[in-house]
Amino acid sequence: MSEWDRDFIEQQLADHSRRRRDPDPLGKQALFSASAPRAGPLGTLTLECSVCKRESPVRIREIPRLVMPFSVTLPRRYHTLMKCPGCGRRTWLRVHWRL
């Protein structure tokens, strides 16, 4: 490998690492990248929102804060009316355990 090839490769690596550190001014990376849903540990209570469609793992001690001042439960797909931890709105949620 010639000296010129090594310099070229090092320059490419430096450009790549600099691009990874610089913020994307147009937000294209965020627009075209899909993030995985946050997964909690096994046995975590998960709330799925009917509005934002996010699945948010919550701890048991966070439930009273989300339920206040009241909660309603009906036999339907999204069965519990409470505050969504993902979008912050009071909406219908589906509660299930992540096993």
Image (tube, helix red, strand yellow):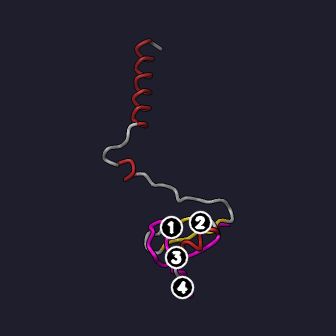
Quadrant location of residue 58?
A: bottom right
Q: Do the residues bearing badges 2 and 1 touch, measured as CB atoms within 8 Å?
A: yes
Position of 2 with respect to 27 (left or right) is right
Tag 4 residue: 72
Q: Secondary structure at mark 3?
A: strand
Write the residue at 32% across / 44% down: 25
Q: CA distance from mark 4 to mark 3?
A: 10 Å
Image: magenta residue range? 74-99
Residue farthest to the front, as pictured:
69
* 19 or 10: nearer the viewer: 19
Q: CA distance from mark 2 to mark 1?
A: 8 Å
Tag 2 residue: 58
Give the mark nearest the N terminus, 2 or 1: 2
Q: CA distance from mark 1 to mark 4?
A: 17 Å
Residue 53, given in percent of the width and then of the height, sits at 47, 69
Q: Amino acid at mark 3?
A: Leu
How crowded is the residue under tag 2: few (<14 C-alpha within 10 Å), some, or many (20+)? some
